[in-house]
Image (cartoon, helix red, strand yellow):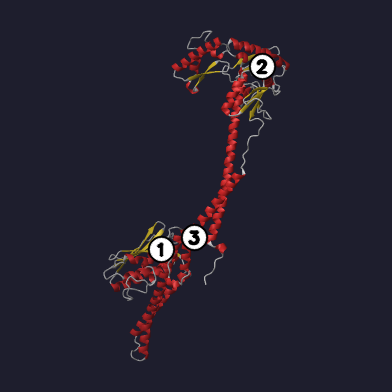
């Protein structure tokens, strides 16, 4: 009876459970991604709104910096509202409406967005305001007259032409007061002498032209004098500029319009003195500019007193999302069920083939090239190997029975005729019986070695061995057999090659190869034993000039009871156990055994083993 698999452990159920889990995770991840994306979009939109609000504040601050009041601001407010899509309203500090882009009677937002005051602003309103808190576009009495601007523009044009003649690019920029200044596009292209030369127009040094762009005009000088008078009381109140001169300078580039040098007589080392002086100058500038700028106002932005809509989902949207998620889940389950069924079908066929009796050697059909198909191919390969091993086992039993039957039959026959008195037990008969017993003993020893190798109990007793000595010993042991067969036995030793090996087992392995070579080499042939070093390895070869081995037989040379000559005659073949023993002995020595051969050109057996250093006590 086939065992029943619990439904919780079935592959189809597990695949369905996995797919449902994946689908749920996918839906959750998608929802999270949607919420995250929407949040990011909202944050980006809020960032864009903040940038638009800063632009609105900057433009209104610029308007206030160049106008003494808010009389004409309504047109500017309507234009900004149309460009930004925002509601813009300006009021005084007591909420008296100045200008509003919305209709009359529209309530103001609960709180103002910012204060519009060009004398108290920050770096976000206009670049340069961070130096003093005053909008740099508020210039007041420092604004140049039309004749002054025309004169300075002419000078700037001459300076630009001077730079152009020497191949240096410059740009003429204007400050909010109308003053031009020349900016070199790449400071590295303008050496100091060229700057000085172009500033003095190459020798045209006159009172009207010399450094005209770097010195204040009469309008600016007058404003600086008035600013000095406004700042002096503050400096004197803080023990600064007592009896000494106050030197204020004007930055013609407009970045830091006014700076000064101060004489401190009593508290020169007092911390905060420089900052106190700067505060005095800044306060004086605010007093000086106040008549020229619009009064401070409150800026309101938004859509009246309504609250901006927040991200929310209606019941219909929620239902739509849940329905979409359920549809995705249903489609996922259906597709997974179809795929799982197709996956399970070949597995069921494989299971059915594996449950058949072993002697039938049933193969599983291979219909795909995926993991299941590869598993079926592996199962079929395993079945083929099992069938081949079964055939080898049967052949081995038959071969062992044959190898043991022949000598036992000879011994039994001669003993029976001797017992019956038909033949006398003369020395020749006893020698024949002894030879048959030796054959039996050799077969049993070979089988015992193979059994020990299979069980992992084949032991070797390693010691330093000169490879050349092994060749000489094996050649001497087989010299008589080679002479009897008419085969020349040669050696090609290398005295520098040493092995860490069992000399008895190595002579056994080489002896098996030599005896096979002599057996398969015709008269007047040659068998050569050679040794050479190959890097850290030592290579032993046994080469003969016999009939060779067919290419299709080479993979089976080291199999048990295999013979190149299929007949079981001992004249052309042994027991078929010698070469398998050689392979196991090499494995026990961490080496390998290989064969190369061509029909009619002999064969070469190669034993490769790790080399060893020559012992220190060897002379």
Residue 485 occupies quadrant: bottom left
Residue drawn at x 37%, y 74% is 575
Depth check: give the residue in front, 397 or 353.
Answer: 353
Disc 3 is placed on an element classified as helix
Residue drawn at x 38%, y 76% is 399
Q: CA distance from mark 1 to mark 2?
A: 104 Å
Q: Is residue 473 visible?
A: no
**Residue at the spot of label 1:** 592
Q: CA distance from mark 3 to mark 2?
A: 86 Å
**Residue at the spot of label 3:** 341
Q: Nearer the viewer, mark 3 or mark 2?
A: 3
Q: Nearer the viewer, mark 1 or mark 3?
A: 3
Residue 26 spot, x, y in % from top left:
55, 49
Residue 198 spot, x, y in % from top left:
49, 14
Q: Is residue 448 visible?
A: yes
For marks 1 and 3, the one nearer the N-term is: 3
The C terminus sits in image quarter: bottom left
Q: CA distance from mark 1 to mark 3?
A: 49 Å
1 and 2 marks in contact (CB < 8 Å): no
Depth check: give the residue in front, 120 or 14.
Answer: 14
Left or right: where 174 falls relative to 478: right
Residue 598 occupies quadrant: bottom left
For disc 3, the neighbor class at 10 Å (few under 14, some 14 to 19, many from 20) is some
């Amino acid at each position: 009876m086939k065992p029943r698999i619990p439904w919780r452990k079935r592959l189809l159920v597990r695949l369905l459970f996995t797919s449902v889990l994946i689908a749920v995770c996918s839906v959750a991840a998608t929802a999270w991604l949607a919420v995250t994306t929407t949040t990011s979009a909202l944050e980006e939109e809020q960032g864009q709104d903040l940038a638009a609000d800063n632009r609105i504040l900057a433009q209104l601050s610029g308007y206030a910096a160049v106008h003494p009041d808010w009389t004409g601001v309504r047109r500017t407010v309507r234009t900004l509202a149309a460009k930004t899509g925002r509601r813009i309203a300006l009021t005084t500090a007591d909420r008296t409406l100045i200008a509003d882009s919305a209709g009359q009677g529209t309530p103001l937002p609960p709180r103002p967005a910012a204060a519009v005051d060009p004398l108290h602003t920050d770096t976000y309103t206009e670049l340069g305001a961070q130096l003093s808190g005053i909008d740099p576009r508020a210039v007041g009495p420092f604004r140049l007259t039309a004749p002054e601007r025309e004169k300075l523009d002419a000078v700037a044009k001459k300076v630009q032409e001077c730079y152009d003649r020497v191949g240096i690019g410059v740009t003429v920029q204007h400050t909010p007061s109308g003053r031009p200044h020349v900016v070199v596009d790449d400071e590295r292209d303008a050496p100091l002498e060229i700057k000085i030369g172009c500033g003095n127009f190459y020798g045209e040094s006159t009172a009207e032209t010399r450094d005209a762009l770097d010195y204040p005009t009469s309008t600016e000088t007058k404003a600086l004098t008035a600013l000095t008078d406004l700042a002096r009381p503050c400096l004197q109140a803080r023990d600064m500029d007592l009896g000494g001169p106050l030197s204020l300078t004007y930055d013609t580039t407009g970045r830091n319009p006014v700076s000064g040098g101060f004489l401190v007589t009593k508290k020169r080392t007092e911390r905060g003195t420089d900052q106190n002086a700067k505060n005095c100058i800044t306060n004086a500038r605010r007093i000086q500019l106040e008549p020229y700028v619009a009064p401070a106002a409150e800026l309101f932005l938004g859509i009246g007193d309504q609250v901006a809509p927040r991200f929310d989902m209606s019941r219909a949207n929620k239902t739509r999302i849940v329905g979409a998620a359920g549809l995705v889940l249903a489609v996922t389950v259906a597709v997974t069920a179809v795929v799982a069924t197709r996956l399970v079908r070949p597995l069921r066929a494989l299971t059915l083939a594996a449950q058949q009796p072993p002697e039938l050697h049933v193969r599983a059909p291979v219909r795909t090239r995926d993991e299941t198909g590869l598993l079926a191919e592996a199962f079929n390969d395993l079945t083929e190997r099992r069938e081949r091993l079964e055939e080898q086992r049967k052949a081995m039993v038959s071969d062992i029975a044959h190898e043991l039957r022949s000598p036992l039959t000879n011994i039994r026959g001669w003993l029976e005729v001797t017992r019956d008195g038909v033949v006398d037990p003369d020395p020749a008969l006893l020698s024949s019986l002894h030879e048959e017993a030796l054959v039996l003993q050799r077969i049993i020893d070979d089988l015992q070695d193979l059994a020990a190798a299979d069980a992992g109990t084949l032991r070797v007793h390693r010691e330093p061995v000169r490879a050349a000595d092994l060749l000489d010993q094996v050649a001497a042991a087989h010299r008589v057999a080679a002479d009897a067969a008419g085969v020349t036995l040669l050696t090609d030793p290398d005295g520098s090659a040493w092995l860490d090996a069992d000399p008895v087992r190595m002579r056994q392995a080489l002896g098996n190869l030599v005896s096979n070579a002599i057996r398969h080499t015709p008269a007047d042939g040659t068998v050569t034993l050679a040794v050479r070093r190959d890097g850290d390895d030592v290579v032993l070869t046994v080469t003969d000039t016999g009939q060779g081995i067919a290419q299709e037989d080479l993979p089976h040379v080291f199999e048990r009871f295999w013979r190149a000559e299929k007949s079981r005659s001992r004249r052309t073949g042994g027991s078929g156990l010698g070469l398998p023993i050689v392979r196991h002995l090499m494995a026990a020595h961490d080496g390998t055994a290989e064969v190369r051969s061509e029909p009619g050109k002999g064969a070469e057996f190669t034993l490769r083993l790790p080399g060893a250093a020559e012992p220190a006590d060897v002379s």
